[in-house]
Image (tube, helix red, strand yellow):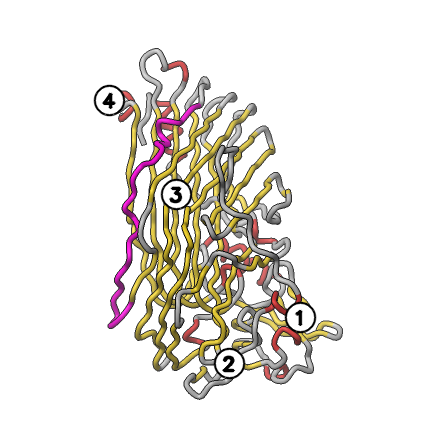
Amino acid sequence: MPASGTRRGRATAALLAAVLLLPAACGRSGPGPTPPGPPATGDQRYGAAPARDPQVTYQPDVVFVGGGGGSVRGLSDDALTWRIDPAASGADQLARGRVMFLTGRAVGRVLDVRRDGDDLAVTLGPVDITEVIRDGTFAGDRPVSLDSPTRYDAGTPFWAEYDAESGAGGGGRMMPVVARRRAAGFAVTPVCCADGVGARFSYDGGGIRVAGTVTLLMKSPSARFHLEIRGGAVRRAELRIAGMAGLRIEIAGATDAGRNINKRIPIPLDFSVPVGEILGVPFSVTANQLVGVQTAFSSRDGNIKAAGEWSLGGDLGFGYADGAFGVTKPWNLTVRNSITDSIYGPSVGVSGIIVHYQAAFRVGLGILGFTSGLYATVTATAGLTVGSALGAPIELCRSTQLGLWLDYGVGYRIPAGLVKVINAFLDLVNAGPIEEKAGIGRVDNVFNKLDVQPDVRICRG
């Protein structure tokens, strides 16, 4: 990223540190994404029960627990521990290392199981879908509309916020963030899916104020998929998320104390659409998000504000066959409103901010970001800087570094920092650890561009 002098170079170095962020919304005129769908209620919260089908072979350590959602007595706020009826069929077969399959959401590797009063408390970790299913071919008969998903709130999980500077799980401070409520200085409102998937956020604490929105714009989104598993290995897979339309970013940040933040926030909420039982397996299409923000203010009066939008056409997805991936790239990006032209922030020093947004679409089994199955994840990172007002008589330098990545495959992926946080907690309660990833996948950097205004030597160097 370009710099104006030594001080700008130092701020740029800090700004380029990779950070995961949370979607946000500044005030913006015009319509935004539609409100989220209704919250899940009753048995709907816990998902549909599986049914045996002769065309599907399960792995030998899968334990089917009977009763579906009716056997669930509660779910912990961190979405790791299910409280179930110990008298449910199959419950007495649960043990560490086995796989519980109670519903399409209550499925995973058993990390711990114990009696707790009248309940059986079962702590689950993510499990690769090929560790559940050994043989089977699954395909949706028609595209699944994502216009009206059901919202599943996790509650107040301990893993929903951690300081990136401290190192996740390495003694870093962890505090809960509740969607659409205020906690730890953050207020968050995620939205999905008819007009887009994204989130509004604000932060106010320690002399720092940040507000913004990041939205992956969509029009009539839908999902189509095909999955063939033979002998516990994926033979063929295909996922298409149709309706990609664009990307919108709005962000504003300021400090009156010369301080900076580096926050990572997985949003503890799923938007989910049930596919229905395919050969007895209750698949769902889910969307969940992760947001992060990092500031790089080099003066006590630092501030920066910007807004931009890009068009983005085509489908998001991939195909896999014969051990090789092919990908549908919706990355024909064209600028609608230049974010670099909009950057504003007069202050004594250089001001910078990074917004990192991740939207993951999954078709499979499980809950929140622990769902396993077919997945396609879009990650957008925008690093913005504005030079010191003291240099304005010569040139006021502004720059944007925009990157887009696509992560896709079959299995599951959890951010490494988040895994460390969760495993630190699981170790305290003597439960087994979870793995960062499983299955097959690939990551492609599909767009990376630096835009400098004005395009002159003092701003480029």
Secondary-structure class at tag 4: helix
Amino acid marked by disc 3: Leu
Snapshot quadrant of residue 403: top left
Q: CA distance from mark 4 to mark 3?
A: 30 Å
Q: CA distance from mark 2 to mark 1?
A: 18 Å
Amino acid marked by disc 1: Arg
Image disc number at residue 251: none
Snapshot quadrant of residue 42: bottom right
Which residue does the numbered mark 1 point to in the structure image? 83
The image position of residue 422, as x and y in percent, is 55, 58
- Considering only order in the chain, which callout, 1 or 2, is on the residue closer to the N terminus? 2
Secondary-structure class at tag 1: strand
Q: Is residue 425 left or right of residue 292?
A: right
Which residue ends up furthest to the bottom in the rendered image?
54
Front-most of residues 253 and 359: 359
Q: Does residue 346 lie above or below 246 as drawn? A: above
Which residue does the numbered mark 4 point to in the structure image? 457
- Considering only order in the chain, which callout, 4 or 1, is on the residue closer to the N terminus? 1
Q: CA distance from mark 1 to mark 3?
A: 40 Å
Q: Residues within 10 Å of mark 1 (few under 14, many from 20)?
A: many
Secondary-structure class at tag 2: strand
Secondary-structure class at tag 3: strand
Which residue does the numbered mark 2 point to in the structure image? 62
Question: Can residue 27 be spotted in the picture?
Answer: yes
Which residue does the numbered mark 3 point to in the structure image? 247
- Considering only order in the chain, which callout, 3 or 4, is on the residue closer to the N terminus? 3
